[in-house]
Amino acid sequence: MVHSKGLLEYGLVQSANTFQKDLISKPQRGFRRISGQLLSPPDPGDESSGSGVTSSAKSSGSPITMDESEYPDLEIPVSIYSPEALGFLGFSAEMSKSLFENWAYDEEWSYKDMVFRHLEEMAAQESQDWHIEMERVGLSKEFQEAIMDPNFGEVRCTHRLMFWIRDTISEIFRVLETMNNRLQNNLDLLKTWSLTTDQHATDQPE
C-alpha cells in the first residue's frame, strides 16, 4: 500500500490562502511553493522586524507584502511519502525513484527506516573518496556540493562522510515533519502583525 498523507494539513492551506492569496500554492508536479512571507514572518513584538514589509502594507493594514529577495520562496513536497520528498532529502532523481518504488512494493520497513537502512548498507562499503562515495549512495549534485562546501572544510574533517550524510538527512526529515506546525505558527504571527499594523494606522492622526 502506498501512503499519500499530505505534508500540510488542508485546514492550514485554506486558512493561509484565505488570509492572503498564494501564501501556499496549489500542488504542481508533486510540490507546493511556500511564500517567503510565510516562512519568515515579522515578529509582532519587534518594531525592527518590519524592515521587510512594504510601507503601503504598514500604513494600510492590508495583507502584508515583503521583499521577495529577502524572503525567498521554498518548494516542498506535497507528500512526505513520495519520490519528490526523497529528492528533497538529498537523493538524486534516479535514486529517489528506485528507493520509493522498492519501499512501496513491500513496505518491509517504515518509510524513514528505509532511508537510513539504505545509508547503512552503503556505509558497509564506504570509500575514502567522498565524491565517489556520494555518487554510489545516490545523492544529488546539490547535496554533494553542500557537503563539500569549502567554508566547512575544517568542521567536515572531524567526522566520517556517512556521519554528515546521516546528520544532514536527519535534519531535513525533521524540517519536513515539523513543517505544518511551523507554518501554522508563522501564519498566526502574520495575522497578529496585520492586526497590529492596522491598529497603528487607525491610531495615526489624519
Image (cartoon, rainbow, N blue to C red):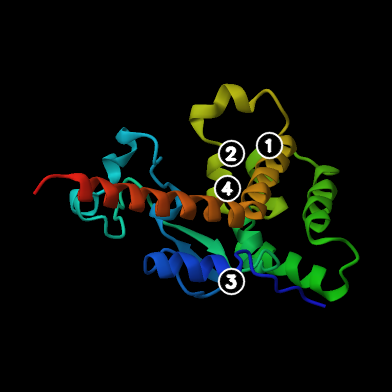
Classify 10 Å Cα crowding around label 2: few (below 14), some (14-19), many (20 and above).
Answer: some
Q: Amino acid at mark 1?
A: Trp
Earlier residue among tags 1 and 3? 3
> In percent of the image, x 41 and y 59: which residue is there?
35
Which label sits on residue 30?
A: none
Earlier residue among tags 3 and 4? 3
| Element under disc 3 | helix
Earlier residue among tags 1 and 4? 4
- 199 or 8: nearer the viewer: 199
Front disc: 2 or 3: 3
Classify 10 Å Cα crowding around label 4: few (below 14), some (14-19), many (20 and above).
Answer: many
Classify 10 Å Cα crowding around label 1: few (below 14), some (14-19), many (20 and above).
Answer: some
Decide: is 117 above or below 77: above
Q: Quadrant of residue 10?
A: bottom right
Q: CA distance from mark 2 to mark 3?
A: 35 Å
Determine which residue is flagged by label 1: 164
Determine which residue is flagged by label 3: 10
Q: CA distance from mark 3 to mark 4?
A: 30 Å
| Element under disc 1 | helix
| Element under disc 4 | helix
Left or right of 42 in this view: 99: right
> In percent of the image, x 29 and y 44: which residue is there?
52
Front disc: 3 or 4: 3
Determine which residue is flagged by label 4: 143
Q: Amino acid at mark 2?
A: Ile
Tell me if label 2 and label 4 are in contact, CB under 8 Å. Answer: yes
Decide: is 178 above or below 128: below
Q: Amino acid at mark 3?
A: Tyr
- Pick the quarter of the image with the N terminus: bottom right
Q: CA distance from mark 1 to mark 3?
A: 34 Å
